[in-house]
Amino acid sequence: MMKLIYQLEHVNKTYKKGKVVANQNISFDVQQGEILGLLGPNGAGKSTLIKQMVGHLAPTSGSVRYKGTSVQTQTKRVAQEVAYYSQEPHALTSLRTWEALYFTGRLRGLTKESALKQTEELLERFGMLDLRHKLLKNVSGGQKRLIGIGTCLIGFSPVMILDEPTNELDPKKRRLVWDLIQERNRQGVTVILVTHNVLEAEQVVDRVAVVNHGKLLAIDHVGVLKQRVDQRMKLEITTSFGESDNVCRSLSALGQWTKTGENRIRTLIEKQNASYAIDCLTEQQLPIEEYSLVPPNLEDVYFHIDDDQDKPAKTEVV
Amino acid sequence: MEKIKPSMQSHDLQLQEAVFLQGHEQQSIIQRRITEWLILARIQFTIIREAWVWIFIMACMFPLTTLLFLKFFTVDPTPAVMTRIITGNMLFGLIVMGLNSMAQEISWQKHQGHFTYYSSLPIAKVNFIFANLLRGLIMSVPSFIILALIGQLAYGIQFHYSWGLVPVLLLTVFSVVGGGVLIGFWSPSHQLTNMLVQALMMFISFLTPVMVDMDQLPKILQWFSYIFPTTYAAEAMREVLISGWSGSVAWNTLVLLLFSLISIILILKKVDWRVEK
């Protein structure tokens, strides 16, 4: 029987006497040992939500419980057991890289020997052993991020909450961070992570919660969410420079298009319409440089749910 | 029923928690708090280690310039006047550190988002504050010593250095630190903190008998000054430096202890550094 780590019930967070709504009626559970991904665009209310989960913000109404007890009444316990990586600037920039990890380990209650051992191991994993005596303010942004993530990894906290841990990291370092998260999860650590990197998160997360405009739009296992778009194919087009709007208009019959880049657009089409879509593309002689028709991934699920939110009749609010 | 990862189904909670406890120190709560304070103090020390020369120079600048100008503006100062000016400046440095710097430092850390790191760790709020205080004390010591040396060497004032100076010095700082911490934690913006502490500093330092004698103040301010710890700190500091420990110093020190306890209780009860309402 899995234990519940977090229980959120009807969590509302508002500012300015209710004029600004950050979170609206959010309810979900987090089970022990799972990796839950919180997805949503900037300003969706994800960071506000996790600040309430670590006890740094009090909900306006509703409850956030950690192992059955309100977070607000046990902030010390939550600080003891939950390692939190935030997007806030680093408080330890005057420290050397090894000191930032070592001191955090000691403050988490590690012995000198264990803190030193884990510091060495983490620096080695980060490929920063030769930078151990460098001040944190003098290393690159990515290396600072790694040390920040290291401060969550040191001391083996049973729960990790990571707010966009792979931001500003190069692909190699991103891979390393995902590997570390998965390793810890295999050791039993429950992980809640906020990320924009939906494609990479898909390989790691067990369940996904999609948040936008402060609301929880959907929460389920990746596979279950993907079934929502299972009968569809993703049509992605790279247009000539500045032609994406024209192409969208010309192909409006195929569905609702989403701009994913300067000259990139995409839509989801029913499988049985695939050949019709190809015919449209080839016959209309549109300014298209490249197109692909592939099965949807988690990112498409995310866009699908997010797009649906703008159509009240079809919105599926959890 | 939601799908559960196969590897997690057989997970034994107790075994898992044992893994998390590996390498953790088995200490009493007091030992744990002392270790924690020492580590936080080391973190604070790293902030000054890179620029200690500049910090030393800047810390000396204020007392030196103040003394210089006061000398110009005071015609034929008597030893009693110079003693008051010098001890007043020594005290002023301590109050600046305990109230002004503490409020600004905490407010700056709050608005920079540094609290997120500290409040995410299982550390006691008081330890965090006292670690900050230690850094402030280290930064105030140069000006304190320089003023004492100038007083002794340039003006021939014979200060009385006794162990009694230590509690007077520490309690002076502790008695005002609560105010600084409360302002720092409450501050809605760093600019507002700066303005507020500057105003408060002027009020406490110049409208209480820190730089002037009690009988030089208007009657209303004389009465008002009894509610500020700086009045007792000035009395105790002056007397302990000039004639050593006495009954009057002990009485003023006791009052400072009371102010310090109120200060610490205010920090413990009124400052919630983890939760933003």
Image (tube, coloured by chain):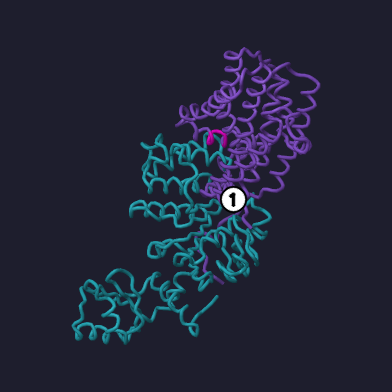
Chain colours: A cyan, B purple
Rendering coords of residue A256 (x, y %): 36, 81
Kindly identify the residue that appears in the image at 66 percent across and 50 percent down: B272
Residue B42 located within the stretch drawn in magenta: yes
* Relative to A247, A125 lies left or right: right
Rendering coords of residue A98 (x, y %): 45, 37
- Magenta stretch mostly in which secondary structure? helix
Quadrant where the C terminus of chain B lies?
A: bottom right
Kindly identify the residue that appears in the image at 36 percent across and 74 percent down: A296
Disc 1 on helix, strand or loop? helix
Kindly identify the residue that appears in the image at 55 percent across and 75 percent down: A318
Q: Chain of mark 1?
A: A
Where is residue A110, by image quadrant? top right
Rendering coords of residue B264 (x, y %): 71, 40
In the foreground, A23 or B28: A23
Disc 1 residue type (three-letter): Glu
In the foreground, B166 or B79: B79
In the foreground, B229 or A146: B229
* Residue highlighted by disc 1: A81
Residue B20 located within the stretch drawn in magenta: no
Where is residue A165, by image quadrant? bottom left
* Relative to A14, A98 lies left or right: left
Quadrant where the N terminus of chain B lies?
A: bottom right
* Relative to A139, A219 lies left or right: right
Give the vertical position of B63 relative to A122 (above or below): above
Neighbourhood count class around disc 1 (C-alpha, 10 Å): few under 14, some 14–19, many 20 upward: many
* Relative to A86, A175 lies left or right: left
Region of the chain picked out in magenta, as a range: B40-44
Rendering coords of residue B27 (x, y %): 65, 36
Give the vertical position of B155 relative to A256 (above or below): above
